[in-house]
Image (tube, coloured by chain):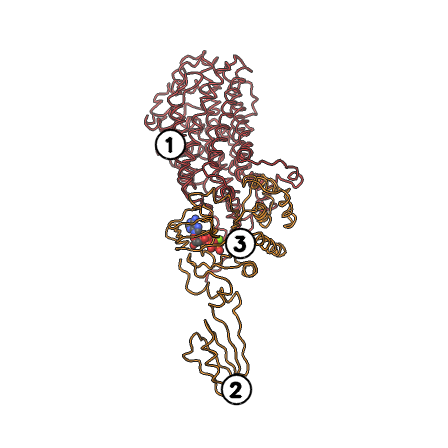
Amino acid sequence: MVTITPLHIWFRLLRHHLRLLAPSSAIWIIGLVAVAMLVSSAYETTMPTEADRQALAISVEGNPAFEAMFGRAISLDTIEGFTMWRAGGPLIPAIVIWGVLVGTRLGRGEEDRGHDELLLGGILSRAALLLSALAALGILAVIYAAATTLGLPLVSAIGLEGSLRFALAMAGGFLTFTALGTLLAQIMPTRSAALRAGLGVVGITLALRMLSVLEAAPDWLPWLTPFGWYAETGTAQIGSNLPFLLFALTTLAFAVGAVMLCRERELHGSRLVTEQESATATRSYRSLWAHQVRQDGPSILGFGAVGVLLSLIFGMVADEFVDFIEGFPAFAEILAAFGLEDPTDPAAYVGLIVTVLVLIPALFAASVVAALRDDEATGRLTVLLVLPIRRVKWLLVNAVVAIAGITLISLVIGFSAMAGTGITGTMLAPLDALRAGLNLIPMAVMFTGMGILVFGLYPPLTGPAVYTVLLASFIVVMMDAFLDIPDWIVSLSPFDHLALVPGEPANLTASAAFLLIGLGSGIIGSIAFRYRDLMMD
Amino acid sequence: MAENNEVLRFDNVTKRFGETIALDSLSMTLERGEVVGLLGPNGAGKTTALRILLGLIKPTEGQATVYGFDTWLQPVQVHQRLAYVPSEFNVWPNLTGGQILDLLGALYGGYDPDIREQYIERFNFDPNKKGRTYSKGNRQKIALIAALMTRADLLVMDEPTAGLDPLLEQEFQTVLREAKSRGQTILLSSHVLSEVEVACDRVAILRNGRLVEYGTLQDLRHLSARTVEATYRGDPPDFADVTGVEDVVFENGHVRLQVTGSTDPLIKAMAKSEITGIQVREPTLEELFHSYYGEEPVDG
Ligand SMILES: Nc1ncnc2c1ncn2[C@@H]1O[C@H](COP(=O)(O)OP(=O)(O)OP(=O)(O)O)[C@@H](O)[C@H]1O
Ligand SMILES: [Mg+2]
């Protein structure tokens, strides 16, 4: 006879947590490792000679425009430095977003759906539950780091030491934001609120990373954020080991904080809400429209604020960038790889930047469709749909509010870029700002429609599918600037078809296609939703 | 259908989830003003039946109608006349209880604020807290108040008192009686047998997705075995071959047995002996359900 101790149960719980994460984590880890391997393997082929490598290092290191995008570049003339910057630059934001997603999921999502009550009915405390979640997340980090460390040397000249350093720096960023996610999950009222707060922190720290490459930025600024720490790890020759310690200490602090807070918190409770505060909310919203605006409003404001911040900063570096380019005409070729035809035109630069910022309205769209599933899984949707409300009307209200939010966020991004350029130099024309903003809308609308399609056909995948497609297609295009990814793969990514407005004319065909795909998949998804069973968790 | 009193009807409704048959050819009807309890062990299909009635899930076969409207094809017409209390009520964490009631009432198409206040008071509910701070019982109160305040013609409730304290359960009984006297029709599922016994005109018992019994409690009692105990002098009476008699136990001048159906053959058999005392006991509700819930092994 086997006696079951709390430790046995805890290990079972850990297995349960790992099983929950396994499907999506496998995709993330494979994607992250594959991209890094691709980039690192391209080093030899794209830059075969020492001279090529020197040229790259001179052109990029210290260039605010490049560094604003992928962070500080160190030792680009070595495979280690190249991998850190070219692969890690875009991958580090991706891996921390993944960290926030899984951290809030295990820290809170299961509880919001009522699963934890079952688990807590047993012998284990809530702290034990959270510790199991943290352990599971730690195991993910180890798997990722091991795969990266062993994978890179297989395809490139990078040594084990170099790839380990890269893997640890990436895993450090992941763990820091994962622990932050679990902490926010204790502070915020729901998982989606925690997720949005976490994404907000990612956005703000990204903005700080960009700011820190400005010539005027103080030297300590990179040390303020995990993205800065990541860049400071550099290579074994030129780089610091201090960031590894900072990653470890911050992760530990967040994790300890989360465990301490979770012990005091009631199930479904939040640290943020006090009884007094709650008693003051009296305003009622008596239509589905008003209700939905209220539900999505904070998130529109949050994504909008991050958009304003990032495009202001990008706008502010526009002139610095143009000056730099005029001094080094040879880089026009590299920039052409990003799709920038005339790099001395500030409008072209703004076009490039704003096009990267399309991620913000697109991520907002993904968060809205993920919330559709959340409403269904928790049963809140049941409560609405037993009222005399058509299912399709409910979806339509959600879609319209989402599109209004997308429009607002996109326009605000365009005009903030204009304001940014105005602060430091020649201001972008208002009409150009408007065009830049409008250009972002169709793609985010398309992701909304595609999300509704998944929601209609296979609801449990709504959030994961949309986030994964969105980030994967973004990364493909980012990588394509330096790698020879087959054209047909790149052309699958919607980002590939986004014109760099206002630097170049809008791609009306692509915009129309985005809108049509969005509309079409939205309609199919709505019909599928009308005629499927409502599925709670 | 205006001339008859039928409120809802299940017509050979079958619901499969993959391999699982959650509901197996369910047919039953409810008349206006009836209070019907839906009983059955866990997984019997009670919630599934109610969700079909609400048009939340589609019957694999058959059809459910409410006031003549198909619940899957015409859910909005159905929802205009019913209110639902789910077994687990999840609320918007950022809305107060009062705001949630306002929203649900307005979206239903209106309600009387005085009636709302009255229920808030009776259920001892604090509407000024945020949704996330409510306990399970308090969330259940929101669902109950929201359903009751609309005065919908039909109330559909899935374990409505789960999570309520005993005093409120008592109050709920009173509320049910009032609703019935107003002419509202009520279908509720429950595991609380005493609740059903007090409140319901008829009970339906589901097991493994099949309707195994539907009738008044008196009918069910009549159909099931009663216990008879008797004392006798002299030779013991002979119950072999007596119709409906089972489980006969003799014990020095005392006999105990179960009888199903008419008691006439039993009485006639007893008359042949000298019976000095007799006692007939109706089954308790627990015994009744024991016999219905446990009759055959639960498969799947
Ligand atoms: N969405 C679903 N997918 C798969 N199986 C389901 C689903 N919903 C219900 N079932 C199955 O259908 C059967 C009936 O479930 P139902 O929830 O109707 O039972 P119930 O009588 O309400 O039970 P309880 O008393 O526990 O509430 C069960 O075997 C259940 O596992
Ligand atoms: Mg049930």
Q: Measure the alpha-carbon separation of dots 2 and 3.
A: 52 Å
Which residue is the site of mark 1?
A37
Residue marked by disc 3: B33
Query: Furthest residue to the front?
Result: B3
Relative to A163, is A106 on the left or the right? right
- The residue sitting at 51% across, 27% down in the picture is A206
Which chain, by letter, is red?
Answer: A
Classify mark 3 as within 8 Å of ligand 2 or not, answering yes or no: no
Colour chain B appears in: orange
Mark 3, residues whose alpha carbon is within 10 Å: few (<14), some, or many (≥20)? many
Residue indicated by mark 2: B233
Q: Amino acid at mark 2?
A: Arg
Q: Chain of mark 2?
A: B
Question: Which residue is located at x 44 percent, y 21 percent?
Answer: A439
Number of numbered tags placed on the structure image: 3
Position of residue A400 relative to residue B181, above or below, is above
User: For the residues carrying marks 1 and 3, which lies nearer the camera in this image?
Assistant: 3
Instruction: Provide the secondary structure element on which disc 1 rests.
Output: helix
Q: Is residue A185 left or right of residue A44?
A: right
Three-letter code, disc 1: Met
* Quarter holding residue A453: top left
Picture layout, residue A444 above or below residue A146? above
**Disc 3 element:** loop
Q: How would you rate the neighbour count of disc 1 (Cα within 10 Å): few for under 14, some for 14-19, many for 20 or more?
A: many
Number of the front mark, 2 or 3: 3
